Image (cartoon, rainbow, N blue to C red):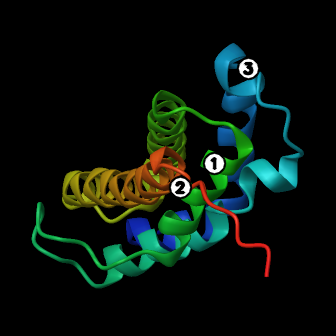
C-alpha cells in the first residue's frame, strides 16, 4: 500500500521540479523571453512564493478572503518593474506558474489523499491569484512614482 500525501507536501517536495518546468515554459514564451534574465534572476522569487503557498495550504483560509501579505510577491512586482516587464507579462508568468503547479499535482495524483484534491486546487488558484494581485500592487505603486512630476526650481539663489 502506498503512502498518501496532502497537496502541500507534494508541492513542497516537488518545488524544484515545478520551478524548472515553469522556467522552461517562460523560456519558450517569446514575450517573456524577450526580457533577458539569468535563470537565477527569473526564478529568484519562486522558492519564497512556494513557501507562502505551502503555508496557505497547511493553514487554510476561506476561499476569496484576503490572503496573508506576501513579502515575496510584493518584491516580485517591484523587481519585475525594474527588469522591464509589463503588467501583461506578470499575468502571463503567473498563469504559467499555475499550469506548472497543476501539472505537478497531476503527475503525482496517485500519491495524494483522495477526495480533497479539488479543494487544494481551489486554494492554490486563490493563493497564486492573491500573490499576483500583491505583485501588481507593488508594480503599479512604483509606476505611480514614475509618473509624479519632477519639481524644477525656477529661481536660483547665488549667496
Q: Can residue 3 be seen in this view?
A: no
The circle drawn on residue 80 is 1
127 on left or right of 109: left
Question: For numbered disc 2, what is the local secondary structure?
Answer: helix
- Quarter of the rendering occupied by the C terminus: bottom right
x, y (%) of residue 138?
45, 60
**Tag 3, which secondary structure?**
helix
Q: Which residue position holds label 2?
A: 77
Q: Do the residues labelled 2 and 1 touch (CB within 8 Å)?
A: yes
Q: Which of 129 and 101 is in front in this view?
A: 129
Residue at (47% x, 60% y) in the render: 111
Structural distance between the alpha carbons of marks 2 and 3: 22 Å
Does 3 appear above or below 39?
Answer: below
Q: Earlier in the sequence, mark 2 or mark 3?
A: 3
Q: Work out which residue is located at the far top of the displayed protein and give it.
A: 30
Q: Distance between the residues labelled 3 and 1?
A: 18 Å
Q: Is residue 88 visible?
A: yes
Q: What's the residue at 29%, 52% (across, down)?
A: 121
Q: Report the disc number at residue 28.
A: 3
* Foreground tag (3 vs 1): 1
Q: Where residue 28 appears, x then y in whole percent?
A: 73, 20
Q: Is residue 45 above or below residue 82?
A: below
Q: Which residue lies at the image location 30% right of the left edge and 50% below the top edge?
A: 125
Amino acid at each position: 500500500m502506498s503512502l498518501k500525501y496532502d497537496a502541500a507536501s507534494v508541492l513542497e517536495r516537488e518545488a524544484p521540479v515545478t520551478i524548472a518546468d515553469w522556467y522552461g515554459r517562460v523560456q519558450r514564451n517569446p514575450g517573456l523571453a524577450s526580457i533577458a534574465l539569468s535563470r537565477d534572476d527569473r526564478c529568484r522569487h519562486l522558492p519564497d512564493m512556494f513557501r507562502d503557498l505551502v503555508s496557505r495550504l497547511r493553514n487554510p483560509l476561506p476561499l476569496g478572503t484576503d490572503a496573508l501579505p506576501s513579502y515575496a510577491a510584493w518584491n516580485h512586482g517591484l523587481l519585475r518593474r525594474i527588469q522591464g516587464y509589463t503588467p501583461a507579462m506578470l499575468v502571463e508568468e503567473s498563469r504559467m506558474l499555475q499550469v506548472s503547479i497543476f501539472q505537478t499535482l497531476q503527475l503525482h495524483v496517485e500519491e495524494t489523499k483522495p477526495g480533497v484534491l479539488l479543494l487544494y486546487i481551489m486554494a492554490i488558484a486563490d493563493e497564486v491569484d492573491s500573490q499576483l494581485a500583491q505583485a501588481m500592487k507593488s508594480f503599479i505603486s512604483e509606476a505611480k512614482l514614475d509618473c509624479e512630476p519632477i519639481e524644477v526650481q525656477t529661481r536660483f539663489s547665488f549667496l
